[in-house]
Image (spheres, grey):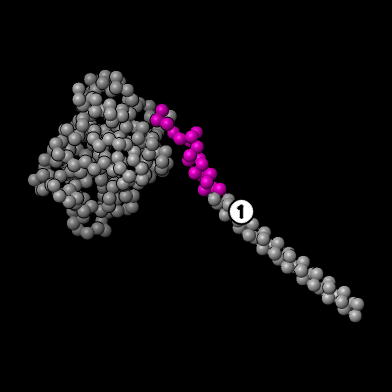
């Protein structure tokens, strides 16, 4: 009998140990899972921290292209030598041009206001071409709408710090064609009326943004191709990944500018 009691006690004890062990294993699994979860969170947080780390934030004087004109004196002496490279205020140069600056509002991929001004600046030759296009398309009942044009180099750096992805933003090393006042983001509307239906909205990075994308309603394709044909007839070239972005011919001959909008306004009033 004593032996039976002893055997039973031993069995109970062993079962308890097994249970404990099971619990320990389960706890270990939970902890491991937690560690994995935490590690994931930590990884994500560390990526965010890297992004927030001020050492990682590129300033507009770091890693910049060889030539950036960022003082008014330099700009003025440059323009004296190359008057065709002067910048003009599009709002004054093309009366009644429609302006819908998406980076001046929250309605853009960055979900942030990148600049607060509402006036638009562009190279004088590109502006002349746009003026001719505006006159020409008026015969068909349309007008141009500007989404973005000149952007100071420091705005491009700001964009890069927010997104850090070459697919969506120009790198600080290269700068953007917008910094040269030689690129424009543009769409069409009926004169005093509705926007024309286009394949996508501004800064849509789906395959539909390609100017060659074909799987679209006929009228949408016609609207897009109409815009592209008018722009290209007057010296602009559409970007192969964005139907709304156009570079003016010889854009590379114009240096990158980092003149703030307020100072650009000063140039215009002289
Ligand atoms: Zn653009």
Front residue of 202/252: it is: 202
- The residue shown at (44%, 33%) is 58
Q: Please say whether residue 48 is one of the residues in the magenta stretch.
A: yes
Q: Is residue 255 visible?
A: no
Label 1: state its secondary structure.
Answer: helix
**Left or right of 38: which side holds 117?**
left
Q: Please say whether residue 196 is one of the residues in the magenta stretch.
A: no
Quadrant where the N terminus sits is: bottom right
Magenta highlight range = 42-61
Q: Is residue 163 visible?
A: yes
Residue position for label 1: 35
Which quadrant holds residue 81?
A: top left
* Disc 1 CB within 8 Å of nearest ligand 1 atom: no
Which quadrant holds residue 264?
A: top left
- The residue shown at (19%, 34%) is 90
- The residue shown at (17%, 33%) is 92
Q: Is residue 43 above or below residue 182?
A: below
């Amino acid at each position: 009998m004593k032996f039976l009691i002893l055997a039973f006690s031993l069995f109970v004890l062993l079962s308890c140990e097994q249970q404990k062990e099971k619990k320990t294993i389960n706890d270990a699994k939970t902890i491991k899972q937690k560690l994995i979860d935490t590690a994931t969170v930590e990884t994500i947080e560390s990526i965010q921290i890297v992004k927030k780390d001020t050492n990682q934030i590129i300033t507009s004087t770091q890693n910049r292209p060889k030539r950036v004109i960022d003082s008014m004196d330099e700009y003025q002496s440059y323009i004296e030598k190359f008057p065709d490279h002067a910048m003009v205020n599009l709002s004054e140069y093309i009366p009644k041009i429609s302006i819908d600056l998406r980076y001046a509002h929250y309605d853009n991929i960055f979900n942030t206001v990148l600049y607060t001004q509402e006036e638009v600046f562009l190279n004088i030759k590109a502006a002349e071409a746009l003026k001719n296009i505006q006159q020409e398309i008026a015969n068909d009942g349309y007008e141009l709408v500007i989404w973005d044009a000149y952007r100071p180099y420091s705005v491009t750096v700001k964009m890069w710090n927010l997104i850090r992805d070459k697919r969506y933003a120009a790198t600080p090393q290269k700068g953007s064609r917008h910094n040269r006042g030689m690129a424009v983001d543009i769409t069409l509307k009926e004169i005093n009326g509705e926007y024309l239906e286009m394949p996508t909205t501004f800064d849509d990075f789906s395959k539909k943004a390609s100017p060659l994308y074909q799987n679209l309603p006929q009228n949408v394709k016609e609207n897009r191709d109409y815009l592209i044909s008018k722009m290209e007839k007057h010296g602009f070239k559409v970007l192969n990944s964005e139907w709304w972005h156009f570079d003016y011919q010889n854009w590379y001959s114009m240096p990158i500018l980092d003149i703030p909008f307020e100072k650009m306004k000063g140039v215009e009033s002289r």
